[in-house]
Image (cartoon, rainbow, N blue to C red):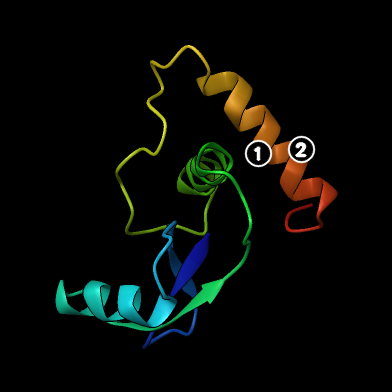
Amino acid sequence: MYFGIDKKTGKAVYVGITKRDPNIRLNEHNRSGKDFERLDVQLEGLTRNQARAIEQYFIEHGPNQLNKANSISPRSEYYSEALKWAEYYLKKNKLIE
């Protein structure tokens, strides 16, 4: 799980997940017009579903201005449970307060 850092502000404006090398993903983002300075890797070693839950949490609570595609649909039967787990995990690991 990573944050895309804006070149102009130096702030995280995007949250994403990938298995690929962050530099390759950075180049893909920038070719599509996002203009990130870098990708700051926040978490590694998560399962795909764990990463999706955390990504969805950040899509809804920031930092995120650019990623509008839900990682987990709000209509999913495990949407609420996934967000609760993500919040617990992020607090436990001191990534949010």
Q: CA distance from mark 2 to mark 1?
A: 5 Å
**Residue at the image position 50 percent from the left and 47 percent from the top:** 55
- Residue 82, given in percent of the width and then of the height, sits at 59, 28
Left or right: residue 3 compared with residue 91: left
- Residue 91, given in percent of the width and then of the height, sits at 79, 47
**Residue at the image position 35 percent from the left and 38 percent from the top:** 70
**Residue at the image position 39 percent from the left and 67 percent from the top:** 20
Q: Could you tell me how many numbered marks the image carries?
A: 2
Are discs 2 and 1 less than 8 Å apart at CB? Answer: yes
- Residue 54, given in percent of the width and then of the height, sits at 57, 45
Residue beneath label 2, please?
88
Left or right: residue 76 compared with residue 83: left
Crowdedness near tag 2: few (<14), some (14–19) or many (≥20) residues, C-alpha within 10 Å: few
- Look at label 2 and name its amino acid: Tyr
- Look at label 1 and name its amino acid: Ala
**Residue at the image position 51 percent from the left and 65 percent from the top:** 2
Residue beneath label 1, please?
86
Left or right: residue 11 compared with residue 94: left
